[in-house]
Image (spheres, helix red, strand yellow):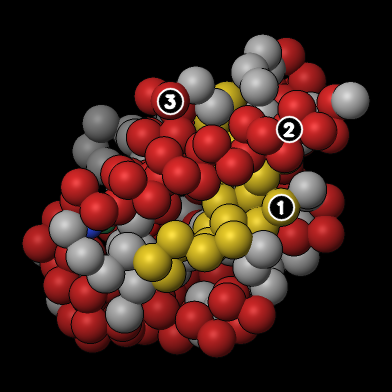
């Protein structure tokens, strides 16, 4: 399988690009979606998180309170490492399991922390969705209501734009409107179809 890793900073447009690639026929596996599956009510990973962080990370219904957990881990690097040590190996295992059964011309793995977790060596190409920091903040604020401060804290815990761009094979600039983004995604898809076909032959 020809494998693309899709990454970018918070609010850069990863999910939007991934959804369009999926619509065009790519096999998309999103590690954020896997993280949600793993931490659903009744999953052993949720119990392990409660053991590590205490019951304050649960809503009154016993589900994971993502906002509470996010606030904890972005305020404290040690807690962030604890969370990553619990989650990342399980996400990776599930990702490989899904990859093995994927039927598509090529695969797209959406991995927000691709460089931070050193997974960029394991794929055929790295696609970075890049946008200016002010657009990242504006888009995330509009979507989630996080404060600019919180968003900046998350951004400073992630690889910088320059680091990501240095590791990219392909870049989609997402600084314009949606139609422009969709056109660029289609171009990328066409390139990947050709490269995947060449890889198979
Ligand atoms: P996160 O890291 O938080 O998961 P992401 O990188 O997956 O974010 P998206 O969710 O795709 O980013 O995009 C962030 C927000 O910006 C969304 O609300 C999305 O609809 C919007 N958005 C993305 N690209 C554009 C664009 N070119 N024009 C207008 N809005 C956009």
Q: State the SS at label 3.
A: helix
Q: Quadrant of the N terminus?
A: top right
- Disc on the earlier residue, 3 or 2: 3
The residue carrying mark 2 is 196
The residue carrying mark 1 is 125
- Which residue appears at 35% of the width and 72% of the height? 131
Position of residue 67 in the picture relative to residue 95 (left or right): left
Q: State the SS at label 1.
A: strand
Q: On the image, which quarter does residue 85 sit in?
A: bottom right
Q: Residues within 10 Å of mark 1 (few under 14, many from 20)?
A: many
- Label 3 with label 1: CB-CB less than 8 Å: no
Where is residue 27? Give x, y as percent: 57, 25
Q: State the SS at label 2.
A: helix
Q: On the image, which quarter does residue 44 sit in?
A: top right
170 or 42, nearer to the observer:
170
Residue 24: assigned label: 3
């Amino acid at each position: 399988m020809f494998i693309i890793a899709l990454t970018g900073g918070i609010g850069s447009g990863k999910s939007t690009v991934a959804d369009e690639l999926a619509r065009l026929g790519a096999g998309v596996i999103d590690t954020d979606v896997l993280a949600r599956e793993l931490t659903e009510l009744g999953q052993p990973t949720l119990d392990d998180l409660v053991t590590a962080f205490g019951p304050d990370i649960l809503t009154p219904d016993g589900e994971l309170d993502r906002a509470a957990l996010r606030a904890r881990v972005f305020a404290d690097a040690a807690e962030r490492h604890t969370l990553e040590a619990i989650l990342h190996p399980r996400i990776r295992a599930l990702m490989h399991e899904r990859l093995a059964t994927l039927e598509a011309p090529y695969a797209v793995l959406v991995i927000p922390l691709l460089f931070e977790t050193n997974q960029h060596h394991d794929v055929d190409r790295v696609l970075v969705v890049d946008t200016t920091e002010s657009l990242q903040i504006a888009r995330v604020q509009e979507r989630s209501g996080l404060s600019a401060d919180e968003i900046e804290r998350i951004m400073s815990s992630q690889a910088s734009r320059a680091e990501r761009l240095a590791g990219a094979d392909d870049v989609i600039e997402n600084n314009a409107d949606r139609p422009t983004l969709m056109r660029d995604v289609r171009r990328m898809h066409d390139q990947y179809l050709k490269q995947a076909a060449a890889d198979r032959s």
